[in-house]
Image (cartoon, helix red, strand yellow):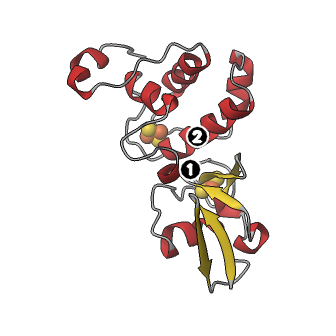
Amino acid sequence: MIELIVNDQVVRMDVPPDMPLLWVLRDHLELTGTKFGCGIAQCGACTVHLDGSAIRACVTPVGSVAGRRITTIEGLSRGDALTPLQQAWIAHQVPQCGYCQSGQIMSATALLAQNPNPGDDEIRTAMAGNICRCGMYGRIHKAIRAVADGAVAIWDPAAQGDAREVQHG
Ligand code: FES
Ligand code: FES
């Protein structure tokens, strides 16, 4: 029996200790916001937090994180209250197909938690392991920059038309 703390909830599962954490999250806990991309720690789609730091769940044996605190994309916000970074993501229209997005947000969130005002090179370095096949790197960078600079407007669905005009590229 393996015990984890996932999104502030204690969970116990009878799974092999060498099972990848990604399998546990998606197949056993039905937290499918975390994606499978490459399976070899090369794309970042499976990024989650281990005690606040970004890790690749596809290459993390669940037994190696027993008793530790895991946060997934589902655990970032509280109900409808998005984090400032999630608000910036919307304002800058970052998602396209969306597949890489939870991993991108988890990596960026970990960066800003450890370094609230990163320089442009620090952002690029921290995000280098997260691949976006839709090529949204510019918008990802701008959204992170907006939070670092304290320039995030609160997301208002009623102003959706205005928000769509914020950034193009
Ligand atoms: S699926 Fe884990 S890094 Fe690609
Ligand atoms: S938004 Fe499509 S892969 Fe990044």
Is there CB contact under 8 Å for labels 1 and 2?
yes
Q: Amino acid at mark 2?
A: Ile
Is the CB of mark 1 within 8 Å of ligand 1? yes
Instruction: Name the side, left or right, on which 15 lies relative to 84.
Output: right
Q: Is residue 15 above or below residue 114?
A: below
The residue carrying mark 1 is: 45
The residue depicted at 55 percent of the width and 67 percent of the height is 25
The residue depicted at 43 percent of the width and 28 percent of the height is 87
Res. 96 in view:
yes
Separation of residues labelled 1 and 2 (CA atoms): 8 Å
The residue depicted at 68 percent of the width and 25 percent of the height is 124
Tell which of 14 and 12 is nearer to you. 12
The first of marks 1 and 2 along the sequence is: 1
Residue at the right extreme of this rendering: 64
Q: Position of residue 154 (x, y in %)?
A: 39, 22
The residue depicted at 62 percent of the width and 47 percent of the height is 44
Q: Position of residue 18 (x, y in %)?
A: 73, 77
Res. 20 in view:
no
What is the quadrant of the C terminus in the image? Answer: top left
